[in-house]
Amino acid sequence: MSETTDKKALLNELRIDRGAAPEGGGKPLKWFVLLAFAGGVGFVLWFFEFPTDDNLLPVSTAIARASTATASGNSVLDATGYVVARRQATVSSKATGKVVEVMIEEGVLVEKDQLLARLDDSIPRAQLELAESRLKATEHGLDELRVNLRQARLNLDRTKELADRNLASQADLDRDSLSVDALIARFERFRQDIVVAERSLAVQRQLLSDMKIRAPFAGVVIAKAAQPGEMISPVSAGGGFTRTGICTIVDMSSLEVEVDVNESYINRVHAGQPVQITLNAYPDYHFPAEVIAIIPAADRNKATVRVRVGFLERDERVLPDMGVRVAFLNEQAEAGPGPAPFTGVLVPGRSVAEDEVGPFVFVVDEDRVRRRTVELGEREGPRVRVLSGLDNGEWVVAELSGELLASLSDGSRIMPVN
């Protein structure tokens, strides 16, 4: 019996009590997984060094823009100017009136004498009808006077016959004669009244016609200044509630370029000189032109002389007030039209650095920079021409100071500030 009891006691000692907590207060496997995950995250952060805005190097950038060959080899003088229209008009009315209808819009091509707008013509039309009535009344008065004059002449003839037979006195004869003369004078006055009435009628017809505003010449409408219901006047009146024009028309065939040339170099320019014009909007195309005239007056404030330059060919791309670059050429140079050959890109001069290898730039590639060796051309003011190694539209680091060069290298992370 005691032997059986001992065996049960031994078995009870080997039994696991599942209600008791394990020694150590937690599950070892769970803590091991958490520690391994935290260590992996720390390793990745340390190894890859995820960047923040505080770690990125701030730099200013600039874009490389396409440049074209200029006529510098044949040019005796380069200048800038603007396209202007020699024939431009703000079309208005001759009299103050209310706009009833506007028949044009910006960009519309109009012909000479084309109807642009109509004004309220109720009063001029009424005045025209009144003038017509006065003319008719004067004409009827003249008809009546013509009958009276005929009667007076018949009376005078009878009085003369009676006087020849001593049946009428000299006083009767004089009276009838003077009556005829008076009617003749009135008849001439009535004829002049008809002339006056006809001229007054012509004036009223012109005033009525002036209520229709027409184009003074063929051109393109570049501005529409009035709408139906607004008042319009040839002079400024009524504060800001009265318009002074219907629209502005430009004769595109009269476009030319005005250039202010420094008076120190005006001796290089003369009438008829060939010129090459390049629009700022189309830098890859040259327009042939020539000097029309040199304005014989200088601007004392700017020390310049104005020069008029005319296009040799009409081009739809040329618009008023466009900025242009003008190259005054030698007489032997030909300023032919056509696209200019591509000769590289222009970048700020301080975006290019140089070392023992040669000139180079830092090209921006998203948030990194790549060092690239380039071939340089001539310097043009604050910019430098890059002949090869850089494409149009690429961005480069703009200000390569000594401190920035020490911090940058191929593949450096940056943060563009513009």
Image (tube, rainbow, N blue to C red):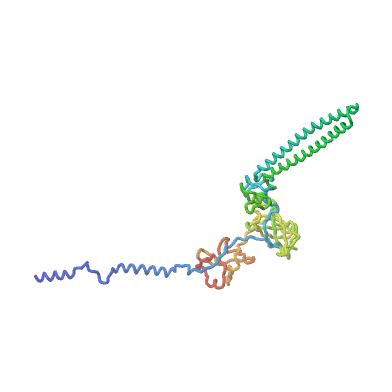
Vertical arrangement, residue 226 with respect to residue 153, above or below? below
Residue drawn where x is 41% and y is 68% of the image: 44
Image position, residue 394 (x, y; %): 56, 62
Q: Identify the residue shown where x is 81% and y is 37%.
A: 186
Instruction: Evaluate whether residue 252 shows in this view.
Output: no
347 versus 319 height, above or below: below
Q: Find residue 193 and report its image quarter.
A: top right
User: Could one spot residue 61 in this view of the protein?
Assistant: yes
Instruction: Choose top left, top right, bottom left or bottom right for residue 331.
Output: bottom right
> In the rendered view, does 159 fall on the left or right side of 267?
right
Quick one: 412 or 108, which is closer to the camera? 108
Q: Which residue occupies the extreme left position in the image?
A: 1
Camera-side residue of 134 and 410: 134
Quarter of the rendering occupied by the N terminus: bottom left
Q: Where residue 15 sits: x, y (%)?
A: 19, 68
Q: Nearer the viewer, residue 84 or 362?
A: 84
88 vs 314, nearest the viewer? 88
How many numbered circles does the render carry? 0
Across and down, in percent, residue 232 comes to: 65, 49
Left or right placement of residue 196 versus residue 242 in this view: right
Q: Quadrant of the C terminus?
A: bottom right
